[in-house]
Image (cartoon, rainbow, N blue to C red):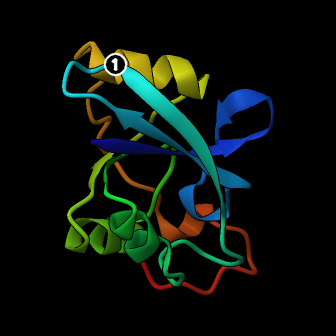
Amino acid sequence: MKIAVPTKENNQIDAHFGHCEFYTIYTVSEKDDIVDKQILRSPAGCGCKSDIALNLSQMDVRIMLAGGIGEGAINKLSSCNIEVIRNCKGDVDELVNEYLAGNLKDGGASCQSHAHDESHVCSH
């Protein structure tokens, strides 16, 4: 299984899925041990308008631990068989370990379009 986390500097989760600097991709063994960690540069633009969901799916990512994320991006990820856990915060390594320990649950509400800056043109 692989887990993806939108990441920014200092190994912190990015508060906005579609605007992160890169994704940290964790490969997890059947015993829930992290066996590999790699970086995937984020495509330019909004996550719901990019091909990131398809790219992650082709890498066998099945879980996305996200901070803020819009419904459009959630729908794209879901259509690629990637489950989204929302409203995550903090260090990405710690988040993945919390998820693997069963201590991380979906935080509910998604990002709303009014939370984006004025240059954002998606229709979530």
Residue 65: tell me if it is visible.
no
| Residue occupying image coordinates x 40% and y 38% | 27
Q: Is residue 54 left or right of residue 11?
A: left
| Residue occupying image coordinates x 51% and y 49% | 68
In the picture of the structure, the residue carrying the numbered disc 1 is: 33
Image quadrant of residue 85? top left
Of 72 and 116, the residue lying toward us? 72
Residue 88 in the image: above or below residue 104: below
Residue 83 in the image: above or below residue 119: above
Residue 92: x, y in percent?
Answer: 57, 28
Image quadrant of residue 19? bottom right
Q: How many marks?
A: 1
Of 48 and 82, the residue lying toward us? 82
Residue 97: tell me if it is visible.
yes
Of 33 and 24, the residue lying toward us? 33
Image quadrant of residue 71? bottom left
Q: Quadrant of the N terminus?
A: top left
Q: Is residue 43 left or right of residue 92?
A: right
What amino acid is at disc 1?
Answer: Asp
Q: Is residue 121 left or right of residue 99?
A: right
